[in-house]
Amino acid sequence: MLRFALVALFIEFCVLSLPVLPQWQWLMATFPMGFFLLSSKKMWLLGAAVIVTIYFFSYVDRSAQALMPAGLIGSTVAVSGSVLGLPVNSPKYAGFMFKLDAPGVANSQARMLRVHWYRPTAQIEAGDYLRLKLLLTPIKASFNKGLSNYEDQLFYRGIQGTAIVKDFHFVENQCSWHQIDCFRSDLKSWISETVTNASTRPLLVALAIGDSSQLTYRHRRILAATGTQHLFVVSGLHIGLFAWACTWLFHHMGFSYHYRLLGAFGCSFAFAALAGLSLSVQRALLMLACYLVLALFRRSAASYAGFSIALALVLVFNPLATGDRGFWFSFSAVAILLLSQFGEVGWASKQKWLGLIVRFRTQGCIFIGLAPLILGLSGQLPLLSVIVNLAAIPWLTLLVVPLLLMVVSARLIIGGLENEFITGGLDRLLQLSEQLAGMLWWFLEFSAEMSPAYAFGNIELLASGAALLAIVIFILPLRLSSNWLLLLSVLPLANFNPSRPPPGELSLSVFDVGQGLSIHLQTQSQDILYDTGSRSLSGSDKGQSVILPALRLLGVNKLDKMILSHSDNDHIGGAQSILKGISVRAVIGAGFGGCTPARLFEADNVKFRVFQVMKTNSDNNNSCLLLITGKHFTLLITGDIEADAEYELVTQQRRSLDLITVPHHGSRSSSSPALLNHLMPAQAVIASGYKNPFGHPDARVVERYKARSIVVLNTATSGALSFTAGVGGVVLVSQELPLQRRFWRYQR
C-alpha cells in the first residue's frame, strides 16, 4: 500500500505541475492494459499507475472545466443559493462561500463562488438562503517568487469563481439538525461573546471549531516565528487526544471493548466534522479508522500501514490535496515521526531515564526533517521551535485542549438549555481555558522576540544533497554516536550570507501586488522599499500578504529606508504592516515629512535622489519620485505623476534612462509624448492589476511606448519582475507568472 500511495503522490504532483492540460482521452486506450497489468503479481504497481493516471487526468480536467469562464468576468448576474461554511462579518466587509442552485453561473458549470460584500447592510449567517445580484470578478492572484497565490488556493478548495454583491435579498435560514455549519456558527458566537481577551479568543475558536479566520497577522507572525502553527490547527494531535479521552470515558462507563472503539471513532468523527474536516483532520481520521478496524479484530496495527492507507485514500478522494500546504506538513510530519520512532520504543522502555531524551530527539527529528519544507514554503527557519514546542505541546494537550473540548462537548449536549447554573458554569470553564491559553500565548510572544530565524538563500545543489542525506540519517533510529554531528551538514539550508550585489550595482524587484506598486531595491549593504501596495476593506493588505513574505525569501530582515510616494491607498495601504513586521530605520515621503527639499543619499557607490517635481492640489502630481544612478545605469521610479508633473520633470531631468516605471499605472492622463521623447527609456515597467476596474494600462499609452521601441513589461501579465543593474545596464532576470503558469489559471 505504501508503494501505491507514493506512486499516486508522484503522479498527482506531476499532473498538477502542468502548464497546459493535454487531451487526456487518449489515455483511455491504455485503460485495458492497466487492468491487465493489475492482475499480474509482478506488474500490478505499473497497472495501478496507469489507472491512477487516467483517473487523475479526468478529475483535474473536470475541475478545470468547472471554473468560471473568463468571458463572464465583468458581467452582472442574478443568482440564488446557500451560504456554506462560516461567513466572515465585519462593519466594512462580509465574505462567504456561496453554492448556487443548478445549473450554475450563466448556465456554466461554476456553482461554488467566493463572494465579497463591501459595506454590507445585513449579517450573513451559516445556512442562509439568498437571492443575489453579483458582479463576477477576476480572481486577484499575485504571482511572486516562492509565494502561493489566491487563485491556486481557491482551485484546490473547489471554489470556481469570485464575485461582489451588488444587490442582496434574504429568503430564509435553512439551518437544521444535520447541518454542522450551524452548530459551528453557534459555538463560534458563544466563544466570541464569552471570551473577552482579543489575543486568546481567535486561538480558542481555531482549536474548538477549526476556524482560523479570526487569527490576525500578529498571531500568524508569532506562530510562524516559534514554529507552533500546527498546534492551533485541529489535526491528528487533537483527534488522537479526543479519541483516547472517549475510549477512557466509555471504559469507565462499562461499555464493552468493541463498543468503546466504535464509540470513540463516532465521537472523533463528530469532532472532526465540527472542526471543518480539513486535510490534516481527514488524514488523522483515516489513520484512526485503520487502527480501530484492525483493533476490532484484535490485530496489531503497524503505524505505517495506517499512514499508507490514509495517504492513498486522501489522494484518491481528493486529487487536488497536494496543492494544499497543510497536506505536505501533515503527512511529512507523520512520516518523520514514524521513521524516528521505528524500533526505538523497546530500547527506550528499558532505559526509562532516557525518556526525556527520546522525546527531545523526536521533536528534533520533526524540526530537522521539516526544515527544507519550512524554508521552501515560508522562507525562514525558527531555530528555537524545538524548545518552544517541548514546552507548548504538553501545556496545550494536557490542559488547554482537554478542558476546551470538554466545555464544547457539554455545550453541544445541553444545546439551548436555559439553566443559569449550568450555562454559567460552562462560561466560567471556558474563561479558565482562556486564562490557560493566555499563559501559553504570553510564552509564545516572549519566545518570538527571542527566537532567531535564518533566511532562505541560494543553496548549491551539492550542499542541499549533503543536508538532506544528513537529515535522513539523523531521523532514522540508528544508534550512532555521531548522529548529532551530522546536523552540521544541515547548516547550508540556512544561508547565513545570502548573495548581494557588488559595490556599484543594484538588484531591483517589482513585486506583483495587483493594482498598486511596491519595489524593493538592494545594494551590497542596504535595502530600500518604495511603496507598499494596497489595503482592502476586508482588513488584509499587500504588506502582510505579499511584501513581508517576499522580503523574507530574499533574506531581508531590515529596511534601511522606506519611501512612500503619496497617500493613495494602492501605494501606502501596506505601510503599517511593514512597520510592524520588520525593522525600518527611516521613512521618507507621504505622512513622514514629504520629499521637499530633495533627499539625497548614497549606498555602495549607487546614488539615490528622492524628490518632488511640483507642489499642487493633485495628490498624484505630488508623488515622491526616486532617481537611481550608478556608473553604468540610470533608473526612475515615478509614482503616480500625470502630464503636468511630467512637463516639469523633463525640464529637470534630461539624461536618458535604462528603466522607468510607467507613471500612474499606465493611465491615459500620464506618459505624455514629451516625457518619452526627452527621457527615452530603454525599458518600462507597468504596475497594474489583472482586469482592474480602472482600465490600466490604457491601450494608447502602451502603443506610445512601443512606437518608440521601448520594451514594456506589465506585472498583470508578467507577475513579479526582477532586474539587475550594473556594468551591462539594467537586465531583466525573471518574470514570475510564466514560471508559475498552470492549466487552471486564467490566461493573461
Image (spheres, rainbow, N blue to C red):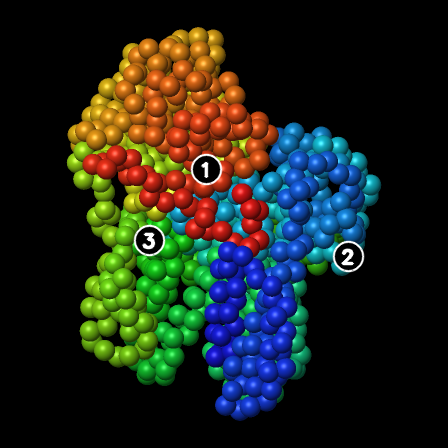
> What residue type is disc 3 on?
Leu
Residue wearing tag 3 = 381
Distance between the alpha carbons at the discs numbered 3 and 2: 45 Å
Residue 589 is at least partly visible in this image: no
- How far from the left and from the top, in percent, is residue 243? 57, 70
Q: Which of marks 3 and 2 is nearer the N terminus?
A: 2
Q: Nearer the viewer, mark 2 or mark 1?
A: 1
Q: What kind of element bears circle 2?
A: loop
In the displayed structure image, the side of residue 570 where residue 485 appears, left or right: left
* Residue 567 vertical placement versus 63 (above, below): above
Q: Which mark is residue 616?
A: none
Query: Which of these two is toward me, 159 or 706?
Result: 706
Q: Position of residue 348 (x, y in %)?
A: 33, 79
Residue type, label 1: Thr
Q: Position of residue 344 (x, y in %)?
A: 35, 80
Establish if 466 lies above or below 732. Answer: below
Element carrying mark 1: helix
Give residue 177's mark: 2
Please tell me in which quadrant of the rendered image residue 641 appears.
Answer: top left
Q: Give the residue pinned by disc 1.
A: 715
Question: Which residue, as the protein is rendered here, is positioned at the far top?
Answer: 616
